[in-house]
Amino acid sequence: MTRRSCVIYATGIVCAHLLIVGITLVVAQVFQTMIHNRLKKELTLTEASQVFESWKNPPPPVYMEYYFFNVTNPEVFLAGGKAVVTQIGPYTYREYRPRENVTFLENGTKVYALNPKSFVFVPEKSRGNPEVDILRTVNIPAVAVMSELNSYSFLLRTIVSMYMKSIGVEIFMTRTVHEVLWGFKDPLLTKIHSIRPEVDEMFGLMWKKNGTHEGEFVFLTGERDYMEYGRIDTWNGLTEMSWWSSNQSNMINGTDGSVFHPLLSRKELLYIFAADLCRSIHLGYVEDVDVKGIPAYRFAPPHDVLQSPEENPTNAGFCVPAGDCLGTGVLKVSVCREGAPIVVSFPHFYQADDKYINAVDGLHPNKEEHETYLDLNPTTGVPIRACKRAQLNIILNRVQGFPETKHLNEIIFPIMFVNETATIDDDSAAQMRTLLLIVTLVSNFPLLIVGMGAILLIVLVVLVCRSRQKKNEVKRIDFTEAFHSFTTAKDETAYTQVSDKPEVEPSENNYTNQPMRNGSYIAMSPVEAQKC
């Protein structure tokens, strides 16, 4: 066997083994299953996992941008006209949210934690100074008091109305942004506090929220099932709420929005419990995106999250009392706001009924600026970028006994909205890209084997073709030489004259006395020649 034949046979054997092994591994998904099991084991809320420290102290900076609606024509509005608002801000604060008092429960299957939040003003990311800028907006304490007194006697409402007027309390107030946001001593609440000490005399949209937490959480670590990773088990000791009018609406579903299980699917719905909204919401897949070179799925709340019960009957449980429902795009949260007529929505009433948008001039909802979304890496479930946007509104309507409200029809009036954003930092992004590269290489290793086998197959075909070409060339050369030799021999022996002398005409005497010369054919005797 020649060296060329050995090479061909060896190449064929190696090629066949690579293709068989590679295709078998691809079909069986051995490496993919192995790396997925590894991810399920590593992505847990345990001290030994790779993500635990990031969960306790999130490295990406979180920014809270506060936008306010400044009312430019309060007198016109109170006289029955249409309110006009202008958006001011953002006033941006860096949010710090480390987890504290972390304690493992039930053999590491659950973990208890508090999540206090603190805020530091960031002037370079803000438009304006909150301690200087003046804001004219709805006097929420006054409106809350009027709403609370709506069920009391007309006489009591009249007395309170006269007292409010005597101390200068009106439906609209003028304060600095800092006061409205972080608190001021309200004269009306101060009076109520003297009668009912449990009522705080200070008011602010973020009053007592700087350095405090939203409740005590117990999370599932994902040790038993990777699908439980980060899911809320209890909140303030509760497995479900009691504010709403249906069991489904009272359910505490999903995570707190900071973590999600790995190996996400485009078809699944993700659930988040939002304590500030007093409910759980779900998010659906929107599109594939890329953030700092990391592939991600974008999830956002679908339109049915805040649809009216007429369009989505499952939302009837959020009507409190039962049957007292608002339209699409808004949610009344008075039940968890001490009875104040507070309504939440997306900014500028994005995805809400036109009647809410058109009730006030100056609102311009659009998807780019007002949509809430999460960009999650599908392999690890880690949030790569997040934008949580929510608007605070208040219900204004006519209340008997308060003359200022006599021209008002019920309206959901916008106060402010917040844009909470976070994007993965560069160091974490680099680590994530490295991890995903390793996962991709390990998962696709069988394809690499198949590819090598395919390359060897091409090499084998080329070698075989060249070998056959060589053999054909050798046979052609041998045949040509043989044919040439045969032709040459025939030319030299088949038709050759013996003598150069001219033939002599034979006479009768010569027939008997001289032998005949063979001048035309070789190997013939004179007798044979004579016969011819």
Image (tube, rainbow, N blue to C red):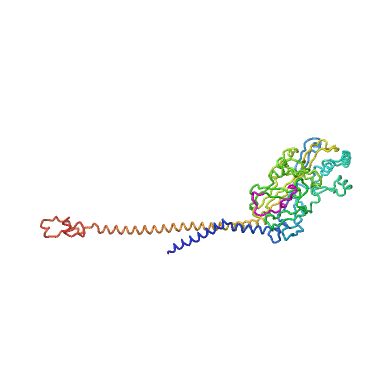
In this rendering, the count of numbered labels is: 0
From the viewer's perspective, is 432 left or right of 519? right
Q: Position of residue 499 (x, y in %)?
A: 19, 59
Residue farthest to the front, as pictured: 247
Image quadrant holding the C terminus, namely: bottom left
Q: Position of residue 424 (x, y in %)?
A: 68, 53
- For the residue pair 79 and 196, the one nearer the viewer reads as 196
From the viewer's perspective, is 346 left or right of 25? right
- For the residue pair 452 and 279, the one nearer the viewer reads as 279
Q: Is residue 439 at least partly visible in the picture?
A: yes
Residue 28 position (above or below residue 303): below
From the viewer's perspective, is 13 left or right of 246? left
Residue farthest to the left, as pictured: 509
Q: Position of residue 120 (x, y in %)?
A: 77, 52
Q: Start and end of the magenta stretch?
A: 247-268
Q: Is residue 173 at least partly visible in the picture?
A: no
Image quadrant holding the N terminus, namely: bottom left
Q: Position of residue 518 (x, y in %)?
A: 18, 58
Identify the residue at horizontal 78%, vertical 35% (top origin). Answer: 81
Residue 463 position (above or below residue 415): below
**Quarter where residue 153 is shown:** top right
**Quarter where residue 168 is shown:** top right
Residue 189 position (above or below residue 451): above
Identify the residue at horizontal 49%, vertical 57% (top origin). Answer: 457
Residue 257 colored in magenta in the image: yes
**Quarter where residue 369 is shown:** top right
- For the residue pair 164 and 254, the one nearer the viewer reads as 254
Residue 184 colored in magenta in the image: no
Identify the residue at horizontal 47%, vertical 58% (top origin). Answer: 460
Dominant secondary structure of the magenta stretch?
loop
